[in-house]
Amino acid sequence: MTDRLIVFDTTLRDGEQSPGASMTREEKIRIAKALERLQVDVIEAGFPTASVGDFEAVQAVARAVTESTVCGLARALERDIDRAGEALRGATTQTRIHTFIATSPIHMQHKLRMSEDQVVEQAVKAIRWARRYTDDVEFSPEDAGRSEFDFLCRVLEAVIAEGARTVNIPDTVGYNLPNQFGSLIYRLRERVPNADKAVFSVHCHNDLGLAVANSLAAIQNGARQVECTINGLGERAGNAALEEIVMAVRTRRDLFTCDSRLDTTQIVSCSRLVSTITGFPVQPNKAIVGANAFAHEAGIHQDGVLKSRETYEIMCAEDVGWKANRMVLGKHSGRNAFRARMDELGIAFGAEEELSRVFGLFKDLADKKHDIYDEDLQSLVTVAGMDKENESVQLVAIRVCSESGITPEANVTIAVDGRERRGTGTGSGPVDAVFRAIEGLVETRADLLLYSVNAITGGTDAQGEVTVRLEKGGRIVNGQGADTDIIIASAKAYINAINKLLLPLQRAHPQTGDI
Ligand code: KIV
Ligand code: ZN
């Protein structure tokens, strides 16, 4: 008998805590829909207390999703739990409240300044309070990976007795090694007297590159829920990568007594969507979803794979969604065909003008690019959403002169709050010249941390998707731009990042500050 492995995706919450990965409400809805197509069991949609925007995003996701359970995070505080409960009210699906408090000596002493007794009391009160909103309550002893075993057992017993249905063991700082973490799960399940009344879950961070290995060790020792993110997105080195855990369990059925219910053919499109929206590119050699994950370069390997796939492949590329990108639309496609494909991709348009705007962008692109793929459509929607929300600075026109032996020069026209400004910049290359010209016009004095270009699809007419990461005064933002001309895509990405820097930031982080 194979048990169910519950997949709890936290891309929209812990993933979003990655510096520069913040998403708009509409983007969160698109990702949530993609996660639902993937058949993820639980979607952690955000931390409603963090800001009004976060609250509204959780509310919108809870109203857009119909199959997966939608979860809101709350510290073990009545006011946080009330916010989560309110955000989830009116949901069109099942809801869960995930509440947490730290249990490691270092966190209790330095962050919470609370005694063990106080922490237990607060945890129990939080479960009781959360159950006013839903029976599906999850509890996490934050920094469990560095907590004292006996105390951890005490907290877990108390919260299970109070009605927590899921107890999640986070390795918050990614400190554990696989055998140690597996054994922790085994011992907890043995020692906590009411362990059989709750599902044991794990939540691993990747600081030592062990998040997936630790999660798998935990599953082999009885964990039946795994918390993870698409592409391993997350704070610092990230969270455990959903696609890697799910495919390891599915591929090595001989070593696991459980499996998820995921439709793995949705993995690649989901990965691309998250990467496009957050601007965090996927490295080519990344397992499962990297561009080279199924590419065989060595002649001997190619020969082997052609004779029998199993010689060098342990999974089918098609099983995770590779080669599934269909050429869908072109220059002659009409509005109805466009709308129908967008529907299939789970992209809904609120108003007819919104559809018209994106359809207009589609037509512009179809003039430049013969075949329009799903990835191009996803990118169009991202770009359309960005233009709408970040209107303060806009790219109007750009002219670049680049010739061998001559310093590249860029002439850029932008509109700032509707007023045009023109400027010139020179640089070591055309992109550098464009960025200098723009910076001369807006004077952000931000530092450029990252610049990367990805081809959205194959072919020389592919759109280049550019990510620009800027930092100013400790705040990090990511900007994205896409165009068949990568210089224009770069200018758009730079301006998108500047617009994000200009937005006021009022957002609390769930795991810092006093409780
Ligand atoms: O890493 C962590 O401990 C968390 C908790 C809030 C579960 O993200
Ligand atoms: Zn975390």
Image (cartoon, helix red, strand yellow):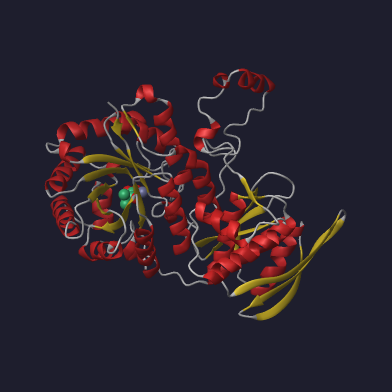
The residue at 48%/67% (across/down) is: 350
Residues 12 and 91: in front is 91
Instruction: Quarter of the image for the N terminus: give it.
Output: top left
The residue at 41%/30% (across/down) is: 250
Left or right side of 466 for 80: left
Visible residue check, residue 161: yes
Residue 264 against residue 53 in the figure, above or below: above
* Farthest right residue in view: 405
The residue at 55%/32% (across/down) is: 317
Left or right side of 207 for 433: right
* Farthest bottom residue in view: 419
Residues 494 and 291: in front is 291
Residues 176 and 376: in front is 376
Residues 243 and 36: in front is 36
Residue 357 against residue 197 in the figure, above or below: below
| Residue 215 % position (x, y) | 36, 36
In which image quadrant can residue 470 be found?
Answer: bottom right
| Residue 468 % position (x, y) | 61, 58
| Residue 99 % position (x, y) | 25, 54
Instruction: Quarter of the image for the C terminus: give it.
Output: bottom left
